[in-house]
């Protein structure tokens, strides 16, 4: 499998390029608008065919490359069926397999950071979006965030995956690139809580500035990052 | 195998933590002084025993954590026998295997960026230091850099590894985290040269500012980053 983790320094976003083999079909997860040309070049250099680009959720800290990638490559753009984005080619549902030749990727609905947050499960790893970060979890104080729902997504779903499952988040701010479910269970400070109520209290007690780009990024991302979209 | 790629945003350095399994012996390659506590915490969380810390070469853009790690953990600090650093527990030679339980890592002398540059070969991957970068190569205009020697290290050694070998460099400035030997052969612009003389001309024609930290980092790194060392 080809698995590339690409970093946007500005927003500390990880974008993932996944394909079963050189020359095969490829998927991009959480592409950042400014790097579209870099992604397209890498896809070309690896002889891949970009068939699908998805976002784990509507991001508030950067503008998505979904629309521009669709324009440039003809790929399908998709998000989960709970999204408010109005610009997509198609939607996936919880439990649905993404269509990508040679790679089994299943969408998991893991709301909490936003109400449209999905994770993506592969045989040995899970891409957790902003639901589970390395030694952290995504904030739950805007875009219909819900700490109780996030607790359920974490403890009811993601943390029930096998402990050796590799964790690839949508962001990291501390120079970490991967973790495991077992490691996060033991060492993620946000997960060392007595129960759901304690987690809700912990998250509601956080005092965070809004993302700098939020007022621009959220409306833009509802249009897949295409400024002149209807 | 545990294989963690840790990023220093300031100098765009990748530091690698390698171990065969949780609870086993661990190695750090190219640690950055400022992140020593983070490394030690991660080692502890994974139940690892840090037995060895090495630098691929004397860096000019950041101060090494070799000395501080040795002080904090009792690990051995090592560099290649061609180094001028005067602070090490031991040295390795070209072709020598690093001593790490359960992981086969062989040092390869790959001079050119500096005259003390080594790469590290594992069964499926190679850590290339500043000799081979993703779509680039390390500059050769200071610290006894030598573009002819670098050509020999690249074309005579690294590029002769199997094409599917994963390439993990000591730096990336463009958000890329891994490549392969085959990919670099085909798409690295510095490697599309007619021969040794053309490569030397290409490298000698580069006009680059010195690294901001060079005057501090090089003398500090000769002392393993320990400011008060003899």
Image (cartoon, coloured by chain):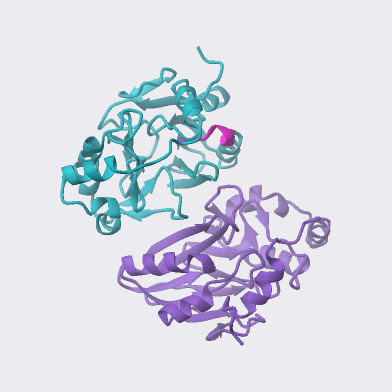
Chain colours: A cyan, B purple
Q: Quadrant of the N terminus of chain B?
A: bottom left
Q: How many marks?
A: 0
| Residue B172 lies in quadrant | bottom right
Q: Observer-nearest residue: A221 or A100?
A: A221
Q: Observer-nearest residue: B104 or A117?
A: A117
Q: Is residue B201 left or right of residue A210?
A: right
Query: A114 above or below A124?
Result: above
| Residue B58 lies in quadrant | bottom right
Q: Is residue A113 left or right of residue B128?
A: left
Query: A121 above or below B227?
Result: above
Q: Observer-nearest residue: A156 or B65?
A: B65
Q: Is residue B207 left or right of residue B227?
A: right
User: How far across and down, in percent of the image, does residue A223 sit?
Assistant: 47, 20
| Residue A56 lies in quadrant | top left
Q: Residue at x 67, y 73 (%)?
A: B218
Whether residue B113 can be seen here: no
Q: Residue at x 74, y 72 (%)?
A: B143
Q: Quadrant of the C terminus of chain B?
A: bottom right
Residue extent of the magenta highlight: A30-36
Q: Residue at x 43, y 39 (%)?
A: A209
Whether residue B62 can be seen here: yes
Q: Residue at x 64, y 51 (%)?
A: B135
User: How far across and down, in percent of the image, does residue B183 sit?
Assistant: 59, 50
User: How far across and down, in percent of the image, does residue B5 sit?
Assistant: 47, 59
Query: A19 above or below B100?
Result: above
Q: Is residue A199 left or right of residue A75?
A: left
Is B77 part of what is drawn in magenta?
no
């Amino acid at each position: 499998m080809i698995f590339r983790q690409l970093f946007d320094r500005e927003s500390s976003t990880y974008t993932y390029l996944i394909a079963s083999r050189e020359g095969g079909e490829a998927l991009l997860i959480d592409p950042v608008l400014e790097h579209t040309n870099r992604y397209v070049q890498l896809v070309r250099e690896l002889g891949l065919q970009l068939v699908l680009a998805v976002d784990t959720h509507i991001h508030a800290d950067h503008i998505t490359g979904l629309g521009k990638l669709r324009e440039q490559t003809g790929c399908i753009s998709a998000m989960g069926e709970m999204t408010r984005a109005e610009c997509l080619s198609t939607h996936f549902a919880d439990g649905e397999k993404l269509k990508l030749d040679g790679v089994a990727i299943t969408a998991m609905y893991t709301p909490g950071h936003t109400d449209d947050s999905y994770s993506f499960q592969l045989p040995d790893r899970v891409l957790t979006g902003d639901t589970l970060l390395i030694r952290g979890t995504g904030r739950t104080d805007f875009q219909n965030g819900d700490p109780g729902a996030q607790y359920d997504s974490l403890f009811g779903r993601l943390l029930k995956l096998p402990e050796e499952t590799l964790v690839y988040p949508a962001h990291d701010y501390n120079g970490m690139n991967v973790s495991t479910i077992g490691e996060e269970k033991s060492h993620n400070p946000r997960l060392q809580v007595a129960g759901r109520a304690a987690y809700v209290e912990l998250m509601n007690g956080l005092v965070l500035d809004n993302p700098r780009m939020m007022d621009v990024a959220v409306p833009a991302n509802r249009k897949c990052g295409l400024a002149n979209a209807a």
